[in-house]
Amino acid sequence: MKTNLINLMTLVKEQEMEYKDSCYSLASYSKNRNAIEVTNQQTESLEDNTQIFSETMNRILELEREINKNKAIIFEKNNSLTLPNGDTIQKTLNIISNKKILLRNLEPLVKITTKKERVTEVNNSYWIKTFPAFDVDHIKSIISQLKSDIMDLEFEISKLNSEEFEI
């Protein structure tokens, strides 16, 4: 069967959702209920979940195997497919993650502005000037470069993710 990483990741996400839903519903199917007549001890089944429990449990085990198999393929492809610069998808994902962390830390810095505050004491009055301890334009250029790098790397990954392969 031919597929690509995008379709495979989508399939895994759907399987994981079904897996979680099935695990959640398993508890509600885990018990049978019988009514026992007090006078003659006759038993009447109110709720028999044996069949649906067994079917749900089998589906959970099947989904678990499929998810593990598909995630292994994704892992293998992420560590074997390379971008034009020679880096694997996995390495590039880590680079992107680190660039995004740096970006989140730098963005608040460009919002720092110069401000003056007047201080008045009994015999004295003066101004305190607070201003950035760095070149704001330089930080802005770093932010711009990080955003550009992230977009370029994500685009290269998306091209590799759409390449078809046999599973």
Image: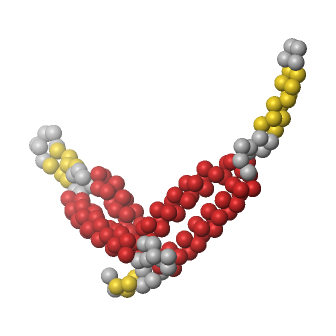
Number of callouts: 0
Q: Quadrant of residue 55?
A: bottom left
Residue 48 visible = yes
Q: Is residue 66 visible?
A: no
- On the picture, is 3 further left or further right than 154? left
Q: Is residue 24 above or below residue 14?
A: above
* Observer-nearest of 10 and 75: 75
Q: How is the image coloured?
A: secondary structure
Query: Which residue sits at x=22%, y=56%?
Result: 48
Q: Is residue 62 above or below residue 40?
A: below
Q: Residue at x 54, y 71 (%)?
A: 154
Q: Position of residue 66 (x, y in %)?
A: 29, 70
Q: Residue furthest top?
A: 122
Q: Which residue lies at the image location 23% right of the left edge and 50% below the top edge?
A: 31
Q: Is residue 12 left or right of residue 37?
A: right
Residue 126 image-quadrant placement:
top right
Residue 122, placed above or below residue 4 = above
Q: Is residue 75 left or right of residue 92?
A: left
Return the x and y of residue 84 as percentages of the image width and height. 50, 79
Position above or below: 44 against 56: above
Depth check, front residue: 137 or 60: 137
Dividing the picture into quadrants, the one containing residue 167 is bottom left
Q: Relative to residue 117, is residue 103 drawn left or right?
A: left
Toward the left, the furthest residue is 40
Which quarter of the rendered picture does the N terminus lie within? bottom left
Q: Whole-percent x and y of residue 60?
A: 28, 63
Taking the spot 55% from the left edge, 54% from the top edge, the residue there is: 101
Picture coordinates of residue 12 (x, y %)? 38, 69
